[in-house]
Amino acid sequence: MYKKKIPLDIDCCVKISLEVIGGKWKTYILYELNKGKRRPSELHRLFVDASPRVINRQLRELELHGMIKKVVYPELPPHVEYSIT
Protein backbone atom coordinates (compact mmCIF):
# COMPACT_ATOMS: atom_id res chain seq x y z
CA MET A 1 0.00 0.00 0.00
CA TYR A 2 1.05 3.58 -0.53
CA LYS A 3 3.09 4.98 2.36
CA LYS A 4 2.70 8.70 3.00
CA LYS A 5 5.80 10.85 3.29
CA ILE A 6 4.37 13.01 6.06
CA PRO A 7 3.67 10.96 9.21
CA LEU A 8 0.17 11.03 10.69
CA ASP A 9 -0.20 13.25 13.76
CA ILE A 10 -2.24 11.08 16.14
CA ASP A 11 -2.56 13.86 18.72
CA CYS A 12 -5.16 15.70 16.64
CA CYS A 13 -8.57 14.04 16.29
CA VAL A 14 -9.46 16.14 13.24
CA LYS A 15 -6.43 14.84 11.34
CA ILE A 16 -7.33 11.27 12.27
CA SER A 17 -10.92 11.79 11.08
CA LEU A 18 -9.73 13.23 7.79
CA GLU A 19 -7.35 10.30 7.35
CA VAL A 20 -10.25 7.86 7.72
CA ILE A 21 -12.93 9.59 5.59
CA GLY A 22 -10.89 12.23 3.75
CA GLY A 23 -10.80 10.68 0.27
CA LYS A 24 -12.82 12.20 -2.56
CA TRP A 25 -15.07 9.15 -2.97
CA LYS A 26 -15.05 7.72 0.57
CA THR A 27 -18.08 9.65 1.78
CA TYR A 28 -20.05 8.65 -1.32
CA ILE A 29 -19.05 5.03 -0.82
CA LEU A 30 -20.14 5.15 2.82
CA TYR A 31 -23.43 6.79 1.81
CA GLU A 32 -24.20 4.05 -0.71
CA LEU A 33 -23.17 1.27 1.68
CA ASN A 34 -25.43 2.78 4.32
CA LYS A 35 -28.35 1.82 2.07
CA GLY A 36 -27.29 -1.83 2.08
CA LYS A 37 -24.69 -4.34 0.94
CA ARG A 38 -23.07 -3.65 -2.41
CA ARG A 39 -20.85 -5.57 -4.78
CA PRO A 40 -17.76 -3.82 -6.17
CA SER A 41 -19.21 -3.78 -9.70
CA GLU A 42 -22.29 -1.94 -8.42
CA LEU A 43 -20.09 0.71 -6.83
CA HIS A 44 -18.10 1.09 -10.06
CA ARG A 45 -21.34 1.63 -11.99
CA LEU A 46 -22.55 4.24 -9.46
CA PHE A 47 -19.38 6.33 -9.67
CA VAL A 48 -18.70 6.62 -13.39
CA ASP A 49 -16.43 9.66 -12.89
CA ALA A 50 -14.01 7.67 -10.73
CA SER A 51 -11.68 5.05 -12.12
CA PRO A 52 -12.01 1.49 -10.79
CA ARG A 53 -8.49 1.74 -9.37
CA VAL A 54 -9.45 4.73 -7.22
CA ILE A 55 -12.64 3.07 -5.97
CA ASN A 56 -10.75 -0.13 -5.13
CA ARG A 57 -8.03 1.78 -3.27
CA GLN A 58 -10.55 3.73 -1.23
CA LEU A 59 -12.51 0.57 -0.45
CA ARG A 60 -9.27 -1.04 0.77
CA GLU A 61 -8.47 1.99 2.96
CA LEU A 62 -11.98 2.03 4.45
CA GLU A 63 -11.68 -1.68 5.18
CA LEU A 64 -8.25 -1.14 6.75
CA HIS A 65 -9.67 1.53 9.07
CA GLY A 66 -12.57 -0.71 10.05
CA MET A 67 -15.33 1.41 8.53
CA ILE A 68 -16.55 -1.27 6.14
CA LYS A 69 -16.46 -5.06 5.99
CA LYS A 70 -15.56 -7.16 2.97
CA VAL A 71 -17.14 -10.61 2.71
CA VAL A 72 -15.75 -13.04 0.13
CA TYR A 73 -18.01 -16.01 -0.60
CA PRO A 74 -16.11 -19.20 -1.53
CA GLU A 75 -17.84 -20.07 -4.76
CA LEU A 76 -17.01 -19.96 -8.45
CA PRO A 77 -16.90 -17.26 -9.65
CA PRO A 78 -15.91 -15.48 -6.42
CA HIS A 79 -18.63 -13.30 -4.94
CA VAL A 80 -17.63 -10.23 -2.89
CA GLU A 81 -19.87 -7.86 -0.91
CA TYR A 82 -19.09 -4.74 1.09
CA SER A 83 -21.14 -3.48 4.03
CA ILE A 84 -20.82 -0.91 6.78
CA THR A 85 -19.58 -2.19 10.12
Image (cartoon, rainbow, N blue to C red):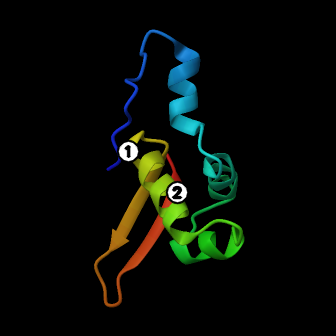
In percent of the image, x 64 and y 52: which residue is there? 25
In-image side of 18 versus 31 (left or right): left
Q: Residue 74 got which mark? A: none
Amino acid type for the residue under numbered disc 1: Leu
User: Dot 1 lies on which element?
Assistant: helix
Q: Nearer the viewer, residue 52 or 83?
A: 52
Q: What residue is shown with label 2?
A: 83
In percent of the image, x 66 and y 46: which residue is there? 27
Q: Is residue 29 visible?
A: yes
Q: Residue furthest top?
A: 11
Question: Does 78 appear above or below 2?
Answer: below
In-image side of 22 versus 2 (left or right): right
Q: Residue furthest front?
A: 5
Res. 55 image quadrant: bottom right
Amino acid type for the residue under numbered disc 2: Ser
Res. 71 image quadrant: bottom left
Question: Does 20 appear above or below 32?
Answer: above
What crowding class fits label 1: few (fewer than 14 Cα within 10 Å), some (14-19), or many (20 or more)? few
Task: Assess whether mark 2 and mark 1 are in contact (beta carbons under 8 angstroms).
Answer: no
Q: Residue 64 got which mark? A: 1
x, y percent for residue 12: 51, 11
x, y percent for residue 49: 71, 68
In percent of the image, x 47 and y 68: which residue is there? 81
Q: Nearer the viewer, residue 57 or 75?
A: 57
Q: In the rendered structure, which disc, 1 or 2, sits on the residue that comes first in sequence?
A: 1
What crowding class fits label 2: few (fewer than 14 Cα within 10 Å), some (14-19), or many (20 or more)? some
Q: CA distance from mark 1 to mark 2?
A: 13 Å
In percent of the image, x 56 and y 26: which residue is there? 17
